[in-house]
Amino acid sequence: MATEAELKKIGIKAIEDDAFRKAFQADPAKAAATLGITFTAEQLDEMKKRKDVLEKAGLRESKMFGSPC
């Protein structure tokens, strides 16, 4: 189970490291494991829900503002 400190560590790593962020978006459990962190099934489910919400919000924003030039 990932602790609050470990979740914070993942967040900081995702902000600072583009490659880690992409890996985390593709497979959160695998990316976290590279830092020695494991998730419970509940934590993974929560991340998937948040990811789905953020992706949908991103799609709405891109439709609203158009593609960047």
Image (cartoon, rainbow, N blue to C red):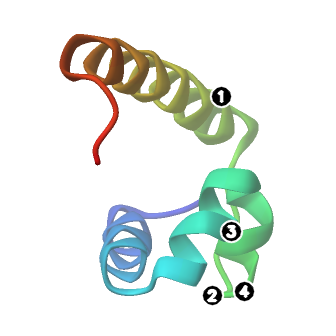
Q: How far apart are marks 2 and 1 (CA)?
A: 20 Å
Crowding at dot 2, Cα within 10 Å, few <14 / some 14-19 / many 20+, comes out as: few
**Residue name at image x 35 percent, y 67 percent:** 11
**Residue name at image x 31 percent, y 69 percent:** 8
Q: How far apart are marks 2 and 4 (CA)?
A: 4 Å
In this rendering, which labeled residue sits more in front, label 1 or label 3? 3
Residue type, mark 3 in image:
Ala
Left or right for 59, reference 65: right
Q: Residue 44, how many percent across, how many down?
A: 66, 40
Name the residue carrying label 2: 35
Residue type, mark 4 in image:
Thr
Q: How far apart are marks 4 and 3 (CA)?
A: 10 Å
Left or right for 41, reference 19: right
Q: Which numbered marker is on residue 9?
A: none
Say whether disc 4 or disc 1 marks the residue closer to the N-terminus: 4
> Which corner quadrant holds the N terminus?
bottom right
Say whether disc 2 or disc 3 marks the residue closer to the N-terminus: 3
Depth order, front residue of 37/21? 21
- Callout 2 touching callout 4 (CB < 8 Å): yes
Name the residue carrying label 1: 45
The image shows residue 1, relative to residue 56, as above or below, that is: below
Q: In which quarter of the image is residue 26?
A: bottom right
Name the residue carrying label 4: 34
Q: Residue 61, how many percent across, how many down?
A: 26, 20
Name the residue carrying label 3: 23
Residue type, mark 1 in image:
Asp
The image shows residue 19, relative to residue 5, as above or below, that is: below
Crowding at dot 3, Cα within 10 Å, few <14 / some 14-19 / many 20+, comes out as: some
**Residue name at image x 33 percent, y 24 percent:** 62
Q: How far apart are marks 2 and 3 (CA)?
A: 12 Å
